[in-house]
Image (cartoon, rainbow, N blue to C red):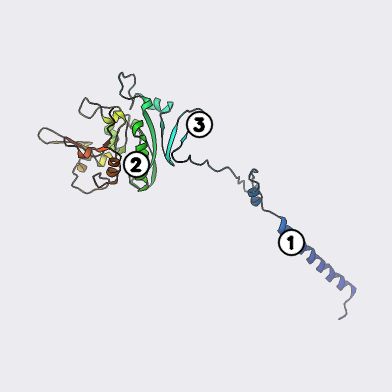
Amino acid sequence: MNLDRSTVLKRIASLGLIIIAAILFKIWGSNSNTLQQYASENPDLAYREADTGTQVTESAPEEPPVGTTCVPGETESIARITYQSSFYYEPLSDNLRRYITGVSYPENMENMVISYDNLRYVHVLHYDFEGNPAEGELICNEKIAQDLVEIFYELYRNQYEIEKIRLIDEYDGDDLASMEDNNTSCFNYRLVEGTSSLSKHAYGLALDINPFYNPYVTFGTEGEETISPVSASVYADRSLSFPYKINENDLCYKLFTEYGFTWGGNWNSSKDYQHFQKNMNN
């Protein structure tokens, strides 16, 4: 086949372009890195993608190891004891002391049976009545703080439902208002209802769990019942079956009694179905 000179030159040029392209592709494929690959190989160099505005940032700090003590912040000297992630306790901060003073903790009262230093702030997680995880906070006696984080962790792990766990101070220290709102609480420097004796709550050694569904019942001289809160009277009949009822088959009962707490539902002179307390020879 006879080809003219111009045709031969065109074919040689095309072949040369193909060869050059193949060589360049091979070089690029063997030596090139993406921006993300480069960053992963050079972790000390943060990068920003100009087109998207996306920025690589440092990951969140890890939780402290279980059972260790840490000191959060430079301005607070608070020793925090972490049992599990989000289950911890610590001394009351100055801000928290101010918040509860004059509410759950009396102001300028002589002969207090407990000091701020004997109390601990407790943070836990729990499942609410919608089955969603929620944060909870309590103030308790330092002697039961470890018990509480362990008990509430087991309740949470078993998805035991508690509607809310808030400081009684959110209810102005009003125990009745807290019960009517079905709030689970602990410390409140108050008397036993209808008496002149300090409650175990005043020592931070008692808790009320889902109190609206587990009311406090007292008996008169002729056997008549007084139920608190009154609006929860239907739940005083423990022969009925209803959600959130604490009895001796309930996980809450089993855990608290395993840790040495007594249950108000076992009392004779009254029945406090919401109430768990621990005697520590105050």
Amino acid type indicated by mark 2: Ile
Q: Do tag 3 and tag 2 residues touch (Cβ < 8 Å)?
A: no
Is residue 9 placed above or below 103 in the rendered structure? below
Horizontal arrangement in the rendering, residue 22 relative to residue 57 (left or right)? right
Quarter placement of the C terminus: top left
Q: Quadrant of residue 31?
A: bottom right
What residue do we see at 25% from left, 37% from top?
262
Q: Residues within 10 Å of mark 3 (few under 14, many from 20)?
A: few
Badge 3 element: loop
Q: Position of residue 247 (x, y in %)?
A: 23, 44
> Which of the two discs, 3 and 2, labels the residue nearer the N terminus?
3
Tag nearer the camera, 3 or 2? 2
Amino acid type indicated by mark 3: Gly
> Which of the two discs, 2 and 1, labels the residue nearer the N terminus?
1
Q: Quadrant of residue 266?
A: top left
Dot 1 corresponds to which residue? 26
Q: Residues within 10 Å of mark 2 (few under 14, many from 20)?
A: some
Q: Nearer the viewer, residue 162 or 178?
A: 162
Dot 3 corresponds to which residue? 73
What residue do we see at 16% from left, 34% from top?
269
Q: Residue furthest left?
A: 222
> Which of the two discs, 1 and 3, labels the residue nearer the N terminus?
1
Amino acid type indicated by mark 1: Lys
Measure how far apart labels 2 and 1 are at the Cα level: 63 Å
What residue do we see at 74% from left, 61% from top?
26
